[in-house]
Image (tube, helix red, strand yellow):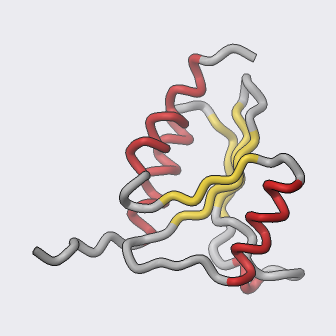
Amino acid sequence: MPKLHVPESAVQHQITDALAVGQWVWAHHPDSRRLEGDPGLPDLIAVHRTTGRLVFVECKGTRGRLSKGQKEWLGLLKTAGVETLVVTPETVDVVARDLVQERRRKR
């Protein structure tokens, strides 16, 4: 049976819904190729309102692959000690649940 195609926008929508419910402050950069500087900035940047947890999130659909610039950004952010998430249709439910549950964690 062929795999159902899930677009990146559906994955991102599920994550931004989870961020809202989980009480995060977040921003989306629609196309990092159009920003000044180096391309590949992750799709979402989020900070939790009470715990201060900072995450950079790259969303990918079924057919999505990380670009060279995205790999570089994610690697450098990890080296700097920043939490990064690459969310796919296979992982979106688990990641969304974790983001929602952040509101229950203590500082």
Quadrant of residue 11 within the rendered picture: bottom left
In the image, 88 versus 19, the foreground residue is 88
How far across and how far down the image is residue 69, in percent?
74, 80
Q: Residue at x 70, y 33 (%)?
A: 48
Q: Residue at x 76, y 17 (%)?
A: 107
In the image, 20 versus 93, the foreground residue is 93
Asked if 4 appears above or below 80 in the picture, the reply is below
Q: Residue at x 47, y 45 (%)?
A: 17
In the image, 21 versus 53, the foreground residue is 53
In the image, 93 versus 32, the foreground residue is 93
Quadrant of the rendering where the N terminus is positioned:
bottom left
39 left or right of 1? right
Quadrant of residue 8 within the rendered picture: bottom left
How many marks are shown on the rendered structure?
0
User: Residue lying farthest left?
Assistant: 1
42 left or right of 75? left
How far across and how far down the image is residue 63, in percent?
40, 79
Asked if 22 appears above or below 90 in the picture, the reply is above
30 left or right of 15? right
Asked if 68 appears above or below 73 in the picture, the reply is below
User: Residue lying farthest top?
Assistant: 106
Quadrant of residue 22 within the rendered picture: top right
How far across and how far down the image is residue 33, in percent?
72, 85
Q: Residue at x 64, y 65 (%)?
A: 43
22 left or right of 10? right
